[in-house]
Image (tube, helix red, strand yellow):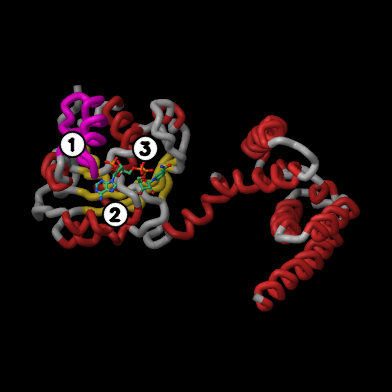
Amino acid sequence: MSQPSLPRLGFVGAGRLARCLALSFSRAGYPVTAVASRTAASASRLASQIEHCAAFDDPQQVVDAADIIFLAVPDDSIGTTAHTLRFVADAASGQNGLTGKALVHCSGASPVELLAPARDQGASIGGFHPLYLFSGDLADLERIAGCSVTIEADGALKDALTALAVALRCHPLSIPAGGRMLYHAAAHYAASFALCSLAECVALWRTLGFAEDDALRALLPMLSGTIETARDKGLPNALAGPVSRGDTGVVEKQLALLEGLGGDHAALYGLLSRRAVGLAERRAKPPAAIEAIAEAVEESLNRSLNQAAAGASVK
Ligand SMILES: NC(=O)c1ccc[n+]([C@@H]2O[C@H](COP(=O)([O-])OP(=O)(O)OC[C@H]3O[C@@H](n4cnc5c(N)ncnc54)[C@H](OP(=O)(O)O)[C@@H]3O)[C@@H](O)[C@H]2O)c1
């Protein structure tokens, strides 16, 4: 049974993220009272899986039936949806510790300021961004445990959102107001850009006759092992490969080979090698040849980036 002091939660949007959060919060004992979506079918599908949860056609009905309203819609619809919602100013603190209602979005990139129309009507506003890629499957409910949720809010809402992150078995993180775009851009390196690195390897291995499936079968265990080592020993000590060993000759030959392939293969390799040099330099005992490697990387980058600039100016 839900405790009376817990805030009632509502969702506008019933997609991949909302499905996981609404079901997880409900399982953790929070009253999830209302869902609306673009289509009635989506809202009903989600609400039907949660006890005492109503599906509504109009997002305003979610505002009326909940204390914290999660806007779980695509980023481009956050501002427009927030503009349509009406909040009645309420200066009194409720049993759940919140003063009035709260409107929260779940995007990592969009500013919380998009919710200003709600704040102007007396509601609290905030951001609740789980650092997790939602598939929409029930497996998300288990897999999200141990992830982090980045919270941008003040006062009682910050406390309430922190409790909700803990209810998901996640770690609450805090970022300063206005920092979301940089935070989100950088987080790509731990998700989509890791995939892009794999895609680059697959593309290069394809020239040797590897099929993508075979390449991934070979690469993914290595990636998993690297992640485990980084977790245990930190980034500088998990770094492997020629930069970490100080193998200048190998680095030079690989840069030359990739420059010979054309395209942006050498530039990508060079830019990532520059980061590898930075990690190797952070080791307690950096390789003796690290300066020579750094020089080789910068020379190659100069060649490939100049070539790219010359190509762009010819067009
Ligand atoms: N997916 C992720 O991995 C992830 C991770 C972290 C944060 N987020 C954030 O979570 C938010 C939702 O992303 P998502 O991946 O869950 O998106 P999604 O799977 O595409 O679901 C979006 C949901 O919003 C509904 N919707 C679209 N426009 C609407 C509108 N104008 N009014 C009401 N409902 C509307 C859709 O309706 P119908 O189903 O009825 O068509 C759908 O249920 C985004 O801000 C995203 O940045 C997502």
Q: Quadrant of the C terminus?
A: bottom right
Along the polypeptide, which appears first: circle 3 or circle 1? 3
- Residue 301 in sight: yes
Q: Is label 2's Cβ within 8 Å of ligand 1? A: yes
Compute the Cα span from label 2 to label 1: 18 Å
Along the polypeptide, which appears first: circle 2 or circle 3? 3
Which corner quadrant of the image does residue 17 belong to?
A: top left
* Residue beneath the point at 18% across and 30% down: 53
The residue tagged 3 is 16
Q: Residue 34 — which label?
A: 1
- Looking at the picture, how far across and down is residue 266, in whole percent? 75, 59
* Residue beneath the point at 20% across and 24% down: 51
In magenta stretch: residue 36: yes
Q: Quadrant of the N terminus?
A: top left
Examine the rendered structure and indicate whether residue 50 appears above or below residue 210.
Answer: above
- Looking at the picture, how far across and down is residue 227, in whole percent? 64, 37
